[in-house]
Image (cartoon, helix red, strand yellow):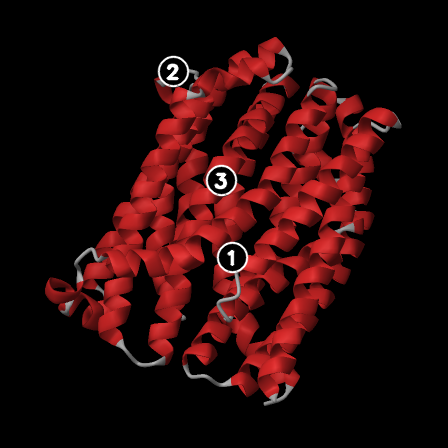
Amino acid sequence: MTIRTEAFKTWKLSAPIILGELTQMALGIIDSIMAGSISYRHLAAAALVNSVMNIPFVLGFGMTMSVSQTVSMANGRRDSLKVSHYLYNGFWLCTISAIIIALVLNFSKNILFHLGQDTEVAALGVTYLQIMGWSIIPMMMFIGIKQFTDGLERTRTAMLLSIAALPINIFINWLLVYGNWGFPRLALDGAGYGTLITRILILLIFIVILFVHPFFGRYMAVRKKQWTLQWHTIKELLHIGVPSSLQAAMESGAFAVSGILIGTLGAVQLAAHQIAISCASLAFMVSWGLAQGGSIRISNAWGRNNWKDIAAIGKSTLLSGICYGISGVLFFVFFRNLLPLAFNNDAEVMALASVLMLYAAVFQISDATQAIGVGLLRGVKDVTVPTIYIAIAYWVVGIPMGCLMAFTFKMGAAGMWIGFVSGLTMSSVFLNNRFFKILKRNAN
């Protein structure tokens, strides 16, 4: 197989994952845009809540990744009984994780007043945090099923549901954020309720599809015997899920903590940061989806013990990530003054956001390749050492560098973004170097 052929196969598998993740990310951006149209303080409140939620949420989200990996491995071995078993155990692991996260967020809602933020911004975010916390439960249940279908390389189902969620969310937001058609005008809280209702609806639809679609029939047919919770299966899922959760939490946590630190500089800086990070996060979803597709394919090949395929898939996926990163650089540079217009019309916020877009452009290649490095290593079940690498890159280098530039050298939000660039670059180099060392070791 040529590099081009393998790249095409990975993109074909990844495209629906990417589109699905983009639409899920768009739900949060829609909330920010609609809230930002009320005032920049509402936008800042949405940014604050997203920063606080990110750390616990990604811990649970990382846990869901174990489902696609184990399902893909079992599918590579043509073991449909094990596939069904992983679905059931993985789904309940995701559900329990989601409930714990939702409870933690609700009980800790008043933390918003203890983060050095603008008091009005914190007050606007309290109820929104509670609502969004409960919405994590249907979202993670949905993702658990999605990881199952992704592991079977049936990625279009979740993509179509995610796309359908967008108009539903926009319509409910339109009713509740602005108080149209006689509904109460709930502002930012209305956006939270819109997201919660939308996530419940698409979860219910996904469950119905799972039981009635002919493709999934073989896995549903054996559920009476295979749908049992077993501790050894949970441990297998946790072996992948816990390090994956820590990896995701340390990365997203670094961005979340940076957002909170930027918030201490004022609402304008936080609103500008939210605009730039929302756009960068949207761009990252393509890299993440590509990494997930490559990881699923590698896990399938790993289940067959085919290192030749693992090498071809890994190299082609990394090359694709580099190409995408270059295109991201060009996009952010050329559109840095236009993208902020979608969020807010405050002149001071827009001016700062356009500057931060340049920093977002700088880290596009590192952002893409480090995501792919994580995915490739997860595909060969190497998760412990990469977790250490990520911890060093973000928390020993990235955050301290950002704080130094932002507060000591008085660069403000831009200084924190220099920290982002440093951490992402180091993470990318460490992770991809390790993957190629593993390839070399197993090629002999």
Residue depth check, mark 1 versus mark 2: number of the one nearer the observer: 1
Residue 393 drawn above or below residue 185: below
Mark 3 = which residue? Answer: 27
**Left or right, 31 with reference to 266:** left
**Kind of residue at disc 3:** Leu
Could you tell which of marks 1 and 2 lies nearer the N-terminus?
A: 1
**Kind of residue at disc 1:** Leu
Mark 1 = which residue? Answer: 19
Q: Residue at x 51, y 18 (%)?
A: 111
**Left or right, 288 with reference to 234:** right
Residue 206 drawn above or below residue 48: below
Could you tell which of marks 2 and 3 lies nearer the N-terminus?
A: 3
The x and y percentages for residue 237 are 36, 58
Mark 2 = which residue? Answer: 184
Q: Residue at x 41, y 58 (%)?
A: 239
Residue at the limit of the structure toward the top, as seen here: 119
Q: Are marks 1 and 3 in contact (CB under 8 Å)?
A: no
Q: Residues within 10 Å of mark 1 (few under 14, many from 20)?
A: many
Gap between marks 1 and 2 measured at Cα: 33 Å
The x and y percentages for residue 412 are 81, 27
The x and y percentages for residue 208 are 22, 54
Gap between marks 2 and 3 measured at Cα: 21 Å
| Element type where label 2 sits in the image | loop
**Kind of residue at disc 2:** Pro
Residue 378 drawn above or below residue 191: below
